[in-house]
Image: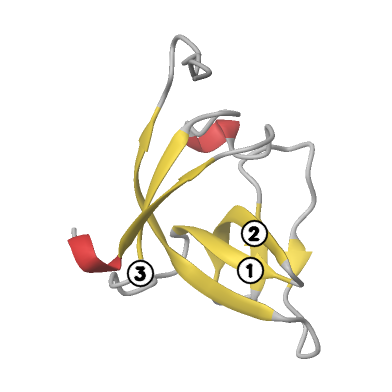
Amino acid sequence: MHPSATFIGRAAGDSMQGAGIYDGDILIVDRHVEVRHQDVIVANYNGEFVCKILDKRNRQLLSASEYYQAVPIQEWDEFSIEGVVVHSVRLHRQCVLLEQ
């Protein structure tokens, strides 16, 4: 892992459950890792951050669920890979923030 190129995000939704990533999981994302075919990535897709499997060969984003269709990456789409998901952390109990 590359500490200066690593950030943390939180997964939202159920489209990546087949890859072991559940709603609310914490994602550790490395911007320095070379992106490979079938990597789980975080990307900016038309202004929205998404966590998907990258199909480099067919230029599309895949979910890890049969309930979601592949999303093609068109030439006119705003698309940038923010990094590769290198780890995920599952929370078994929601944290409560104390108000001051």
Callout 2 amino acid? Phe
Callout 3 amino acid? Arg
SS under mark 1: strand
Q: Residue at x 52, y 59 (%)?
A: 42
Q: Which residue is drawn at 52% across and 73% down?
A: 81
- Decide if residue 47 is on the left or right side of residue 83: right
Which residue is labeled 1 in the image?
44
SS under mark 3: loop
Which residue is labeled 2 in the image?
49
The 10 Å Cα crowd at callout 2, few under 14, some 14 to 19, many 20 or more, is some
The residues tagged by marks 3 and 1 sit, at their Cα atoms, a distance apart of 13 Å
Which residue is labeled 3 in the image?
31
Q: Which residue is drawn at 65% across and 62% down?
A: 61
- Decide if residue 50 is on the left or right side of residue 66: left
The residues tagged by marks 1 and 2 sit, at their Cα atoms, a distance apart of 5 Å
Examine the rendered structure and indicate whether residue 92 appears above or below residue 56. above
Query: Colour scheme used in the picture?
Result: secondary structure
Contact flag, marks 1 and 2 (Cβ < 8 Å): yes
Q: Looking at this view, is 87 or 35 the one in front? A: 87
Q: Which dot marks residue 7?
A: none
Callout 1 amino acid? Asn
**Which residue appears farthest toward the front when viewing the image?**
100
Q: Looking at this view, is 49 or 34 the one in front? A: 49
Image quadrant in which the N terminus is located: bottom left
